[in-house]
Image (cartoon, rainbow, N blue to C red):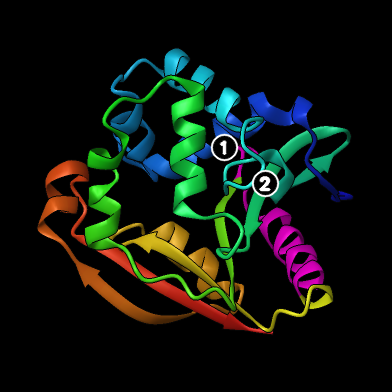
Amino acid sequence: MSIKIRKAVAEDAPFLAQMMLQSSRAGKKYGIFDLLFETKDDVAVLKCLESLAVIGKNQHCHFSNFLIAEIDTQSVGCLCSYEPRIATREAFVEALKEVGCCENTEEKLEVLDLCGFEKNSRILMFDFMEEIEGFIDVGVLKALMQKSLLNARLKGYRLGQTVVEIGSLETLLYYKKLGFKEVEQKECELYKEKFGRTGLVLLSIEF
């Protein structure tokens, strides 16, 4: 089974929207995008995420930050990598406003501000590492990460990080299999109140 890794293009927005929603929920019924877009209607959330994927190039959800894994021309997985010095919180907020799906953006993002970790501008961040059902454990995520790390080295990076929910055991296991190590945990009552998980874990990899 041959896995092809390519850069995402604007036409991948519907697939990326599905993967971002899947990743944000991480096995839960409610995630950050449900909170931001104030709806539990999957169709409405996906429509907003499709728009977000093609708006505001300097924000982490933009398609240009994603790699797509394909098997027999079918998109089966993705991985986002972005530079915090470029893909800033401010750029994300502006993109959300432009999409028009989100009100009181700053207030809703407070949960990430209080429960998150300070981003280091000298590292590369990874997010939305996902694969579709039916293609789990066939090497999709490993191929995506290998290509992302190669691209990161070419840009001069030697350290990458990602943030995973405490209790998201499957995702934690995937990252640790790929060589990431746990750096810090942060428990947060507000995060637990909003999403039912006790907080977040910061993982890091040197390459």
The quarter of the image holding the C terminus is bottom right
Q: Residue at x 67, y 57 (%)?
A: 141
Which element is circle 1 on? helix
Q: Is residue 43 visible?
A: yes
Residue bearing the label numbered 1? 19
Disc marking residue 86: none
Residue 100 inside the magenta-drawn segment: no
Write the residue at 50% across / 23% down. Answer: 99
Q: In the shown orientation, is residue 190 left or right of residue 128?
A: left
Whole-number angstrom distance, CA of label 2 to CA of label 1: 7 Å
Image: magenta residue range: 131-152
Amino acid type indicated by mark 1? Met
**Structural crowding at the residue carrying mark 1, measured as other residues with C-alpha within 10 Å and reported as few (<14), some (14–19) or many (≥20):** many
Residue 143 magenta = yes
Number of numbered tags placed on the structure image:
2
Q: Which residue sits at x=64%, y=40%?
A: 62
Residue pointed to by mark 2:
78
Horizontal and vertical percent position of residue 139: 72, 58
Give the structural element (helix, strand or loop) at label 2: strand
Residue 134 lies, in percent from the top left, at 64, 38
Q: Is residue 13 left or right of residue 116?
A: right
- In the image, 34 versus 82, the foreground residue is 82
Which of the pair 20/130 is nearer the observer? 20
Task: Please tell me which residue is depicted at 62% across the width and 31% down the height of the picture.
Answer: 55
